[in-house]
Image: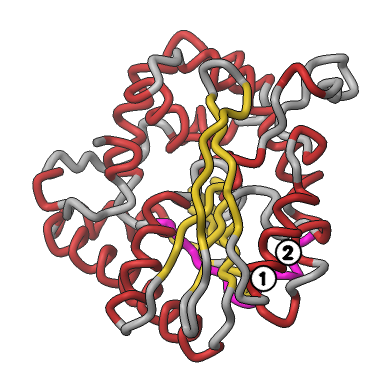
Amino acid sequence: MQYLNLEDINERCRRDPADFILTSEQQYTDLIERVAEQVCASRHQILLLNGPSSSGKTTTAHRIRDAVQRRGIRTHSISMDDYYLSRNTFPVPKDEFGADDLESPLCMDLPLLSEHLAALCQGKTIEVPKYDFMTHRRTEQREEIRLRRGEIAVIEGIHSFNDVVTGKIQEHATGVYISVNTAVVLSPNQLLAPHELRFVRRAIRDRKFRDSPVLDTIRMWYSVRRGERLYIQPYLSTAAHRLNTYLPYEDCILMHLLRREVEPYHRELTDAGLEPLVRALDRFARLDEVSHIPPQSIMREFIG
C-alpha cells in the first residue's frame, strides 16, 4: 500500500502543477512498461487482467497491449462481457436483499470461456460469441481467433481470475491485478482508503459519460463493493503482477468536480460508508490545468 500525505499533494499542486502531472504520469507509464516487459519475458499465451470498479482497467489494458506489441508480440483481445449468458436462458441470481446480482459469475458462461482459452493454448481456432447489452442476449455473430506462435490473448474482466476460468490454463497464463493501491492521509487519524478514491472516479465518470446521477452511484456502491469482496478478492493469489493506477495529482481535479455534485447528499454518502470523503471534499488544492494531461492518461476515462 502506498500512503500519500495530503499536505504534500497540495504543496506539489501549488508549486508546479504541470510538473506534478508530468511526474505522476511518468511513474504510471514506468509501471506499464515494467509489467509489459515481464509479460513478454514469461512467454505465456494468455494475459488475464482483473480489477475492481473504476481502477482504470480499460486504459491500462490498452496501454499494456500497446507496450507488448511494441516489443514485437501480437495480441488478441477477448472481452469477458461477450460471455454473458442471454438473460432469458437462466435464473438471475439474487443478493441477500433479493435484488438481482448481475455481477455474479452465474450470469456468465465461464465454462465456455475456460474451454476456449484451453483451445487457444493448443493452437486451435475458437469462435468468440458477441453479446448485445441492449437486448441482453447473445447474438449470432462470432469472431474467430487463433493464436499463432508467440502471440498472446488478452482477457479483461472481474471474473478473469476465477478458478473456473484459470483451471485449465494455469501453466499458460499471467495475471495482472489493476487497482488503486494508494491511501491519502488527511491527518494522523484520518485517511481516504483506496475504495473511496475509486468512488470519486466512478461518480465523475458515471455522471459525465453514462448520464447517471451521483445519487445513483452512491446507492449502487454497496453492491459494487459486495461484488469485489465475493468475486475478485478470493482469487487475488492468481495475480503475478499488481499495478497501482492512482495518479497523485488526480484528486486535485476530481474532488472539486465531485464537490458540486454531492453537496446535497452528504447524509447518503455517510450511510454508504463514505463519511471520510465528506470531510475531504474541500481539502485538496485545485488544479485547473487539465491541458497538461496527456491524451493516453488514465484520467481521460473519468474526465474526458
Residue with the mark numbered 2: 236
Question: Which kind of residue does numbered mark 1 sit on?
Answer: Ala
- Residue 126: quadrant of the picture: bottom right
Position of residue 199 measured from the top left corner of the image (x, y, whole percent)? 52, 35
Please name whichever residue, 56 or 104, is drawn nearer the observer in this view of the structure.
104
Please, which residue is most extreme toward the top here?
A: 264
* Residue count near mark 2 (Cα–Cα under 10 Å), binned few <14, some 14–19, many ≥20: some
Secondary element type, mark 1: loop
Apparent side of residue 52 relative to residue 68 in the rendered image (left or right): right
- Residue 28: quadrant of the picture: bottom left
Position of residue 127 measured from the top left corner of the image (x, y, whole percent)? 58, 51
Question: Which kind of residue does numbered mark 2 sit on?
Answer: Leu
What residue lies at 37% left-to-right and 58% top-to-bottom? 62
Residue with the mark numbered 1: 239
Please name whichever residue, 154 or 285, is drawn nearer the observer in this view of the structure.
154
Please, which residue is most extreme toward the right here?
A: 96
Range of magenta residues: 235-246
Q: Based on the picture, tell me whether residue 146 belongs to the magenta stretch.
A: no
Q: Quadrant of the C terminus?
A: top left
Residue 205 sits above or below residue 115 on the image: above
What residue lies at 80% left-to-right and 70% top-to-bottom? 168
Answer yes or no: do the residues labelled 2 and 1 have beta carbons within 8 Å? Answer: yes
* Residue count near mark 1 (Cα–Cα under 10 Å), binned few <14, some 14–19, many ≥20: some
